[in-house]
Amino acid sequence: MTDIISQKREMRRAMRAARLDHWQALPQAHRALIFGRPPRAILPLIESAEIVGLYHAVPGEVPTTRYAMHLLDIGKMIALPWTREHAGPLAFRLWTGSEETLEKGPWGPQPHMAMPQVVPDALFMPLVAFDASLNRLGQGGGHYDGWCAQHPATRRIGLGWTVQQAERVPTDDHDMPLDAVITEQQVLLPTNERVLP
Ligand SMILES: Nc1nc2c(c(=O)[nH]1)N(C=O)[C@@H](CNc1ccc(C(=O)N[C@@H](CCC(=O)O)C(=O)O)cc1)CN2
Ligand SMILES: Nc1ncnc2c1ncn2[C@@H]1O[C@H](COP(=O)(O)OP(=O)(O)OP(=O)(O)O)[C@@H](O)[C@H]1O
């Protein structure tokens, strides 16, 4: 086991716990409201996108329900992660925005296999941890890493709570930095510019 792998494992453990604690402390009705719509600062990353990728949040993750509704309202198509099996590669399939059109997948609700597979032009990704250099730590399955490596033109936007910011996320050669991170307190951009959401 290389040092980076064990550092990532330890950071994942600590940050998953911090993420869940933070989420649990928020009143349920407030969680989704905090992330109402993508902040102005990231509009350049999504304005020309026809298809925007989101995710179906699990406990602890930043909720995406309001983003989904907003993106549909402004005429975007939205897509969600889809995998055939646990270890399977990640794909994206279109989503109508209705919970009823989702079915049970290996990792949770996902679009039906009959929905068209698409390549989102911009992708909102759940984070386990991030840092000021826009490095991302995910679940460790390599799902997003693999997909992003094959689709480098897709803009990568991380969603996380401020408590998930690390001093420095350990990185491998395959890790691709994000184009932006949105938290409940700020938007992090590559220039280290800090703006309010
Ligand atoms: N909401 C959501 N959807 C997603 C992801 C995600 O992180 N969040 N994914 C992101 O890739 C993909 C699914 N991959 C996942 C990989 C691992 C775990 C997970 O929960 N892992 C275990 C720990 C596994 C380990 O450390 O060995 C866990 O947290 O208990 C979840 C999803 C696609 N869909
Ligand atoms: N582009 C890639 N090509 C081949 N293997 C990769 C690639 N990206 C990641 N992997 C492999 O996937 C596994 C998980 O990588 P890593 O620990 O960086 O996960 P992560 O970024 O936290 O997770 P995820 O990408 O699922 O959000 C590692 O074994 C890594 O070698």
Image (spheres, rainbow, N blue to C red):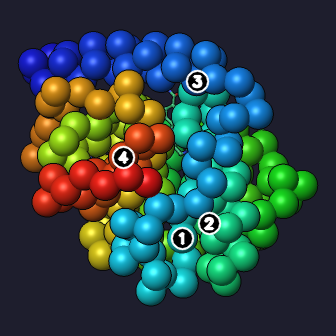
Q: Which residue is mark 1?
A: 52
Q: Are marks 1 and 2 in contact (CB under 8 Å)?
A: yes
- Label 3 CB-ligand 1 distance < 8 A: no
Lower position in the chain sequence, tag 2 or tag 4? 2
Q: Return the residue nearer the eye: 27 or 7.
A: 27
Q: Residue 21: percent from the left, percent from the top?
A: 53, 14
Pair 3/2: label in front: 3
Q: Which residue is mark 3?
A: 23
Q: Are marks 4 and 1 in contact (CB under 8 Å)?
A: no
Question: Does the image show residue 30?
Answer: yes
Separation of marks 3 and 2 at Cα, in angstroms? 24 Å
Lower position in the chain sequence, tag 4 or tag 3? 3
The three-letter code of the residue at mark 1 reads Val
Q: Which structural element holds mark 4? A: loop
Separation of marks 4 and 3 at Cα, in angstroms? 17 Å
In the image, farthest residue toward the right:
100
Pair 4/1: label in front: 4
Lower position in the chain sequence, tag 1 or tag 2? 1
Dot 2 alpha-carbon crowd within 10 angstroms: few under 14, some 14 to 19, many 20 or more: many
The three-letter code of the residue at mark 3 reads Trp
Q: Residue 54: percent from the left, percent from the top?
A: 57, 57
Question: Does the image show residue 82?
Answer: no
Residue at 47% from the left image edge and 57% from the top image edge = 124
Residue 186: image tag? 4
Residue 79: image tag? 2
Residue 58 lies in what quarter of the image?
Answer: top right
